């Protein structure tokens, strides 16, 4: 396990916790049944800690996406380097035989 795998796991766990900390934006199914969710288009602004958690979730989601792409590129380069070194080793063995 490389260092970037550990960082990726930590970012994933932080993103999960931040997502769970966010409050619900609606009343859910119970509001639909009882008629409590009639103010669907009402303006509700996030304030204080809700806004901070929302922005942190957005930031960590972008970081998660960036790290996923970087890890994919690093692993593909390592795989191509390993296959090219295997090919060159096999070619060297063929030349010796």
Image: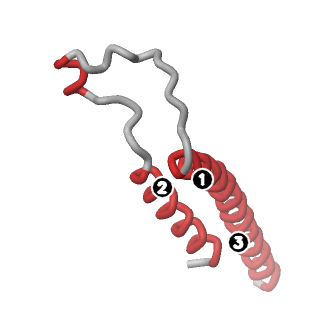
Labels 1 and 2 touching (C-beta < 8 A):
yes
Mark 1 and mark 2 lie on one chain; the one further toward the N terminus is 2
Quarter location, residue 91: bottom right
The 10 Å Cα crowd at callout 2, few under 14, some 14 to 19, many 20 or more, is some
User: Viewed as shown, does residue 31 lie left or right of 2?
Assistant: left
- Would you place residue 79 above or below residue 66 in this image? below
| Residue at image mark 2 | 18
Numbered disc 2: secondary structure: helix
Please indicate whether residue 95 sits to the left or right of residue 33 in the image: right
Residue 50 placement (x, y as % from top left): 51, 47
Query: Which of the colour schemes (rainbow, by chain, secondary structure, one colour) is used?
Result: secondary structure
**74 or 48: nearer the eye?**
48
Q: CA distance from mark 1 to mark 2?
A: 7 Å
Q: Residue at x 71, y 58 (%)?
A: 70
Q: Quadrant of the N terminus?
A: bottom right
Q: Position of residue 5 (x, y in %)?
A: 58, 71
Kindly state the secondary structure of the residue where label 1 is placed: helix
Give how far apart the Cα atoms at labels 3 and 1 are.
Answer: 38 Å
In percent of width and height, residue 7 lies at 60, 71
In what quadrant of the picture does the C terminus appear?
A: bottom right
Q: Quadrant of residue 94?
A: bottom right
User: Can you identify the residue that label 3 sits on?
Assistant: 82
The residue shown at (60%, 55%) is 60
Q: Nearer the viewer, residue 71 or 89?
A: 71
- Which one is closest to the eye, mark 3 or mark 2? 2
Whole-angstrom CA distance, mark 3 to mark 2, is 38 Å
Does label 3 or label 2 sit earlier along the sequence?
Answer: 2
Spot occupied by residue 25 in the image (x, y as percentages of width and height): 41, 33
Asked whether the residues under the numbered discs 3 and 1 touch, taking CB atoms below 8 Å apart as contact, a structural biologist would say: no
Q: Which mark is residue 56?
A: 1
């Amino acid at each position: 396990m490389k260092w970037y795998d550990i960082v990726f796991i930590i970012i994933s766990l932080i993103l999960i916790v931040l997502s769970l900390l966010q409050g619900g934006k609606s009343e859910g199914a119970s509001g639909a049944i009882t008629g409590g969710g009639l103010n669907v288009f009402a303006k509700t602004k996030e304030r204080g800690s809700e806004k901070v958690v929302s922005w942190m979730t957005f930031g960590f989601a972008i970081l998660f996406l960036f790290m996923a792409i970087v890890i994919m590129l690093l692993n593909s380069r390592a795989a191509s380097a390993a296959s090219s070194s295997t090919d060159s080793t096999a070619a060297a063995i063929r030349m010796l035989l």
